[in-house]
Amino acid sequence: MRVAVLIMVKRTGFWLVLLWGAICACSIPQSTQPHFEPWQTLFNGSEWDGWESISFGGEGEIEIVDGRAILPMGSPLTGIRPPQPLPQRMDYEVEVKAARISGNDFFCGLTFPVAESSATVVLGGWGGGLCGLSCVDDEDASYNQTRSYHSFEYGRVYTLRVRVTSQKITAWVDDVVLFEQAIVDHKISLRTEMLPSEPFGICSFLTRAAIHSVRWRPL
């Protein structure tokens, strides 16, 4: 009788240990952060490395000054793009460090691929403060839900980071979330005047801007 009880206790203890282990495993929070490869530099602020001016028509002549690519005020756009597109159209991050030198419109219009389409994040457009994504369901940043307004200091360098996944586009300015826009069941596209920068480029609108660096990394 004692032997039977002892066996039962041992078996019960064994299952309790398994149950406790399962509970502990379920209670451990699982990381939702994607894994990234190391950053890869596309533009280091001092060498073109094959970057070229975007032919918008009315663009200014770009110069490298003090480790920055200077985008002169265009009529209305001036921009640059790398010799090759990004290696991936989904599941990546891209980062641009840029500053407004003069002018009152966007100093950083980053066009980037999203699956088979492209989109543009603008910083400081429509009079100097509007930020957002163009276009979502055929509405540009001034009308869709990514719209927000921010103050940008002249000469200060801001870091724009954009993450593209199969589910959404997320943008940060200086590590503060600018917007999150779902991709599923939404149309993502470019404004017509931004088509020359497709699939990847950086431009300014009626504004003199400085691009300090550009880099990307795959998820």
Image: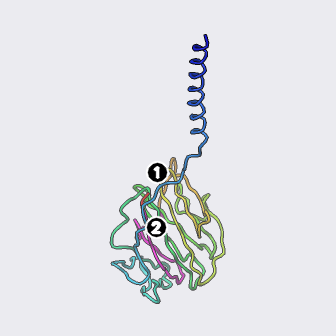
Find residue 111 and name its label: 2
> Residue at 33% across / 78% down in the picture?
50
Quadrant where the N terminus sits is: top right
Q: Horizontally, is 198 left or right of 159 in the view?
A: left
Q: Nearer the viewer, mark 1 or mark 2?
A: 1
Total numbered labels placed on residues in the image: 2
| Residue 209 is a magenta residue | yes
The x, y position of residue 182, in whole percent, is 54, 52
Q: Quadrant of the C terminus?
A: bottom left
Residue 135 vertical position relative to residue 215 in the rendered view, above or below: above
Q: Are marks 1 and 2 in contact (CB under 8 Å)?
A: no
Comparing 5 with 201, the one in front is 5
The numbered mark at residue 216 is none
Give the x, y percent position of residue 17. Answer: 58, 31
Q: Nearer the viewer, residue 158 or 207?
A: 158
| Three-letter amino acid code of the residue under disc 2 | Thr
The residue to which callout 1 is attached is 166
Magenta residues (range): 190-217
Please tell me whether mark 2 sits on a helix, a strand or a loop. Answer: strand
Most distant residue in the front direction = 2
